[in-house]
Amino acid sequence: MFSNAIASRPCLLYQDQESGPMLKVGFLRASVSNAQTHHLLFSLRRINLATAIGNRSKLVRSAMGSHSTASSQSPKLLFRQLFEKESSTYTYLLADVSHPDKPAVLIDPVDKTVDRDLSVVKELGLKLIYAMNTHVHADHITGSGLIKSKLPEVKSVISKASGAKADVLIEHGNKIYFGDLFLETRATPGHTSGCVTYVTGDGPDQPQPKMAFTGDAVLIRGCGRTDFQSGSSEQLYKSVHSQIFSLPKDTCIYPAHDYKGFTVSTVGEEMLYNARLTKDEDTFRGIMANLNLAYPKMIDVAVPANLVCGFQDLIPKNC
Ligand SMILES: N[C@@H](CCC(=O)N[C@@H](CSS)C(=O)NCC(=O)O)C(=O)O
């Protein structure tokens, strides 16, 4: 309702102590629902017209949970964050909806939710081209093999350094295109030796702010454990500081898991508040050596399955 108005006029989104969330456009003033607020913040960010007001009220943004987290936007990008509750895994769907084919990728699909994910792909008229993995997961079986059994034209993707089989073995610096949009691969070993982070590209129509799909390298306020699969806390610390914390501070961080109910963070936020990665390297090493986490329940099934699940013809029957 307000989108056209705010596209052409300076406006103010604020929290009135009596009336709740309010939008002021020129001389007009109206109260807005929480859902409208979310939508408006999204639009305001895109056109860069949001103005904070002084002591009288607070920006509604601060009432939205995660501290100063922004949503990424591109006129071409369709983006969905999907959740698998048993392993608390996030799967991400990205598509270029400006392209006639609407080519799409799934990042870190889970076998148990493949049918749900493919239904969304179908309903939205997308053409899935890649089922991408950030690493060989230890706590659940990737959906990439199952997806290929249903849609043989889809290509599975994982890093060459992971030692896993897949149609596309990517390396640091490689780009994965879907339509005009692309993801760039950054090697971020440490949780496992083959972990990568996929970062949206630079250039016209690429999402702004950038989006980083960090797998288990950076979790919100935490990070992946480093006690198996050739994990190394030294390597993880270096990976995160050189490859993720070097991204623009407004880059949105989308992890592979969350166990606390968070959905998204930013590089700036994690550089300030990450309970592990803000520490110096020695302290970080000590924290990681004393996590005392139980091994993932599915590790003995998941790791061998994920080392072959990229190849449809090698998928074990439970995969
Ligand atoms: N309880 C879960 C496993 C939880 C776990 O170990 N998560 C991993 C990522 S999946 S291998 C992790 O790195 N956690 C870090 C942390 O601080 O929690 C299960 O049994 O599957």
Image (spheres, rainbow, N blue to C red):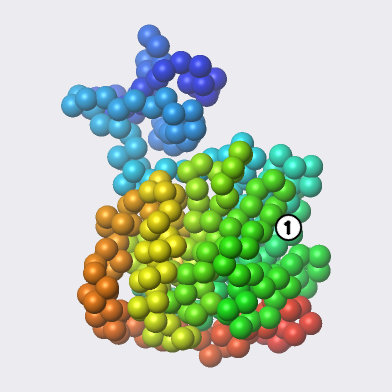
| Frontmost residue, 314 versus 282 | 282
Q: Is residue 143 left or right of residue 292?
A: right
Decide if residue 142 is on the left or right side of residue 190: right
| Residue 112 pos. (x, y %) | 61, 71
Q: How many marks?
A: 1
Asked whether residue 83 is in view, the answer is no
Q: Quadrant of ligand 1?
A: bottom left
Pick out the residue farthest to the left. Answer: 55
Farthest residue, direction top? 27
Residue 319 drawn above or below residue 209: below
Q: Please name the residue shown 53% across and 90% down the image.
A: 300
The residue pinned by badge 1 equals 128
Residue under the image location 24 percent in, 80 percent down: 286
Q: Is residue 23 left or right of residue 182?
A: left
Q: Residues within 10 Å of mark 1 (few under 14, many from 20)?
A: many
Residue found at x 74% / y 67%: 155
Residue 52 visible within the image: yes
Q: Position of residue 178 (x, y in %)?
A: 70, 52
Q: Nearer the viewer, residue 70 or 40?
A: 70
Position of residue 294 relative to residue 10, above or below, is below
> Residue 198 appears at what percent x and percent y?
55, 60
The residue depicted at 67 percent of the width and 73 percent of the height is 169
Residue with the most extreme bottom position: 300
Q: Give residue 14's quadrant in the image.
A: top left
The CB of the residue at mark 1 lies under 8 Å from ligand 1: no
Q: Dividing the picture into quarters, in which one does residue 270 lie?
A: bottom left
The quadrant the C terminus occupies is bottom right
Q: Amino acid at mark 1?
A: Leu
Q: Position of residue 214 (x, y in %)?
A: 48, 63
Which picture quadrant has residue 262?
bottom left
Helix, strand or loop at label 1? It is strand
